[in-house]
Every structure is written in C-alpha cells, then in structure tokens.
Image (tube, rainbow, N blue to C red):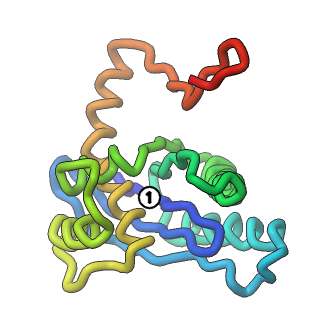
Amino acid sequence: MRILGIDPGLATTGFGLIDADGQRLAYVASGTVRTKEAALGDLPGRLKILFDGIREVVDTYQPDCASVEIVFVNVNPQSTLLLGQARGAALTALVSKDLAVTEYTALQMKKAVVGHGQARKAQVQEMVKRLLNLAAAPPQDAADALGLAIAHAHAGASMAALGKVTELTRRQHAHFRGGRVY
C-alpha cells in the first residue's frame, strides 16, 4: 500500500510517501509545497498553490490513501485560522482525487514514530531516517509528513480490522454544549 502523509502549513506544507508491505516500510519520496511565490496577503492565491501542489503529488505518485495532521488551537487565534484554511485546502485536494484520508494528531504521530508523544522535531527526523533507512534525515516538514505516513502504516491495518467487526465513527474534535466547547 502506498501512503501519502501531509503536514499542513500555509507557508510550507510537507509531504511524504512510503510503501508499506506488512511491517516493511520503503521510502518513495518526500518534499514540500511552498507558497512563498504568492504575496503574503494573498490568502486565496496561497491556498490555490497548496491545492494544486498536493494534487500534483497525488497525480505523480498515485498513493492508495493519505494521512493528515490534525491541527489544534495555538496561542495565536489568527495563526490557527490560517493553518486551518491551509489544512482545508490540503484535505480538499486529497478528497478531490478520491483518496481515503485518515487524521492523526502530532502526539499520535510522535508516539508511533519515536515512542513518546513529547518528542522533539530532531527526534522525529532521526527516527524517520532510521525507520526508512535513509542516508540523511529529511527536513522537518517532510519528516513530519513521513511520520504521519508511518503512523498510518502502523495503525491503519488495525483500524481496518476493527472496521470489519464494528462500525467505526469519526470522533468530533470538540462538542458544543451550553455555549461551551468540550
């Protein structure tokens, strides 16, 4: 199975592709989609670059499925909104190519790749290098995307098996009750 991992970002979105055959993982490709050619204030232009770039990656490498990082609220609400829009462009690009998309938190990815959820970026890069037998550690955004693909390779088979015996439902990120978010 070929898995595409996406680490969304408005300025730089990382992507990473692996082939998974049981426990064997093989590196296919990784890189970034950068939106710096669009003006800083041109949000629609930047989102279009992300959308087109991810569709091009899908067309080039023909993945079977995708995994995308779930974004949580940051300290700066404006940054969170912009990142959410970049994530939306990435998700739309993937589903427009009829790919099944699974979402993982950064904590879940780090736990799957490094072994603990509080791992630093450098630790993720080093473990991705080791797990995929790479000559050098990939850049941070690409390493995170490869980590998401690895997390899905590890968890995807289990989730598929569970899905055969019981109905799996999407978990809501937040529930609204009485004007409060839980």
* Residue under the image location 84 percent in, 74 percent down: 42
- Packing grade of label 1 (10 A; few <14, some 14-19, many >=20) is many
Q: Is residue 94 above or below residue 138?
A: above
User: Residue 108 sits in which quadrant?
Assistant: top left
The residue that disc 1 covers is: 5
Residue 32 placement (x, y as % from top left):
52, 76
* Residue under the image location 49 percent in, 51 percent down: 68
* Residue under the image location 68 percent in, 52 percent down: 77
Q: Amino acid at mark 1?
A: Gly
For residue 70, side relative to residue 3 (left or right) = right
Regarding residue 22, the answer to whether it shows in the image is yes
Residue 156 placement (x, y as % from top left):
33, 39
Q: Is residue 22 above or below residue 178?
A: below
Residue 21 placement (x, y as % from top left):
22, 52
Regarding residue 97, the answer to whether it shows in the image is no
Near-viewer residue (110 or 2): 110
For residue 44, side relative to residue 3 (left or right) = right
Residue 19 placement (x, y as % from top left):
31, 60
For residue 151, side relative to residue 50 (left or right) = left
For residue 87, side relative to residue 7 (left or right) = right
